[in-house]
Image (tube, rainbow, N blue to C red):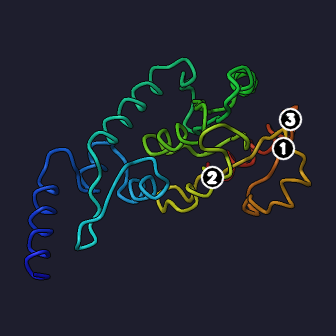
């Protein structure tokens, strides 16, 4: 009885894994244009719906991959993702406040530095952009709906292909509160809002000099 039950389970799993409604992690990575590890992290974070076969292999629903592709397309053509391609150093600004994003981008463009500036409205959209473009520097808010800055930075640090990306946190939170939480890596400086743009400019220039 137990053997028969196991055989039926194997037949069901084989049938499901061959179903076009499911993808392997490698197939999903190819469709999304990101690294295999990025897909694995998105599965663990719940951004992609997946299950495991009896052999321990992940199968990802095509529906959740298609939803991500739509978000990628939306992020690429939306007003918050406009780029200023004026230089080789790429800065990604992440903030759920559209006005704050615009202010930061406008100020950075006024510095006349050799930078490209792009934006994302939350941590999840930022990870999509990082998977596509590999920015040199991430300027991110910490408290955002959906995936906040803390969670995004943790995911970023777990991505082997993104570990060289510098991060600067910009937050309205009290620095003592952030420090007590111990949620920021020691190499991530914290600037408090209103943004001290002179300090931010110095940090950006230091990172450009270190790269070039």
* Disc 1, SS: strand
* Disc 3, SS: loop
Q: Which residue is rendered at x = 29% and y = 62% of the image?
A: 58
Label 3: how many residues lie within 10 Å, few (<14), some (14-19) or many (20+)?
few
Q: Position of residue 40 (x, y in %)?
A: 40, 59
- Looking at the rendered structure, which numbered label has been put on residue 33? none
Q: CA distance from mark 3 to mark 1?
A: 7 Å
Q: Measured along the vertical axis of the image, is residue 175 above or below residue 89? A: below
* Disc 2, SS: helix
Of the 4 image quadrants, the one containing the N terminus is bottom left
The residue identified by callout 1 is 191
Q: Position of residue 85 (x, y in %)?
A: 53, 26
- Looking at the rendered structure, which numbered label has been put on residue 151? 2
Mark nearer the viewer, 1 or 2: 2
Describe residue 182's horizontal placement relative to residue 136 as left or right: right
Badge 2 vs badge 3, beta-carbon distance below 8 Å: no
Label 1: how many residues lie within 10 Å, few (<14), some (14-19) or many (20+)?
many
Mark nearer the viewer, 2 or 3: 2
Q: CA distance from mark 1 to mark 2?
A: 18 Å
Q: Which residue is rendered at x = 37% and y = 29% of the image?
A: 70
Closer-to-camera residue (50/85): 50
Q: Which residue is rendered at x = 8% and y = 65% of the image?
A: 11
The residue identified by callout 3 is 193
Q: Position of residue 126 (x, y in %)?
A: 55, 40
Q: Measured along the vertical axis of the image, is residue 20 above or below residue 77? A: below
């Amino acid at each position: 009885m137990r053997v028969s039950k196991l055989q039926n389970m194997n037949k069901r799993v084989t049938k499901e894994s061959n179903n076009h409604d499911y993808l392997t992690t490698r197939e999903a990575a190819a469709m999304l244009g990101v690294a295999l590890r990025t897909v694995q992290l998105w599965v663990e974070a719940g951004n992609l719906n997946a299950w495991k076969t009896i052999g321990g292999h992940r199968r990802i629903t095509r529906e959740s991959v298609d939803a991500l592709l739509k978000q990628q397309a939306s992020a690429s053509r939306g007003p918050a993702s406009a780029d200023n391609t004026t230089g080789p150093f790429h800065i990604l600004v992440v903030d759920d406040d559209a006005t704050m994003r615009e202010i930061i981008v406008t100020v950075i463009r006024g510095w006349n530095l050799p930078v490209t500036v792009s934006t994302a409205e939350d941590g999840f959209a930022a990870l999509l952009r990082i998977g596509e473009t590999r920015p040199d520097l991430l300027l991110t808010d910490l408290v955002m709906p959906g995936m906040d800055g803390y969670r995004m930075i943790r995911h970023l640090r777990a991505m082997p292909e993104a570990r060289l990306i510098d991060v600067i946190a910009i937050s309205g939170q009290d620095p003592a509160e952030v420090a007590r939480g111990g949620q920021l890596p020691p190499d991530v400086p914290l600037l408090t809002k209103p943004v001290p743009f002179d300090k931010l400019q110095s940090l950006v220039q230091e990172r450009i000099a270190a790269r070039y």
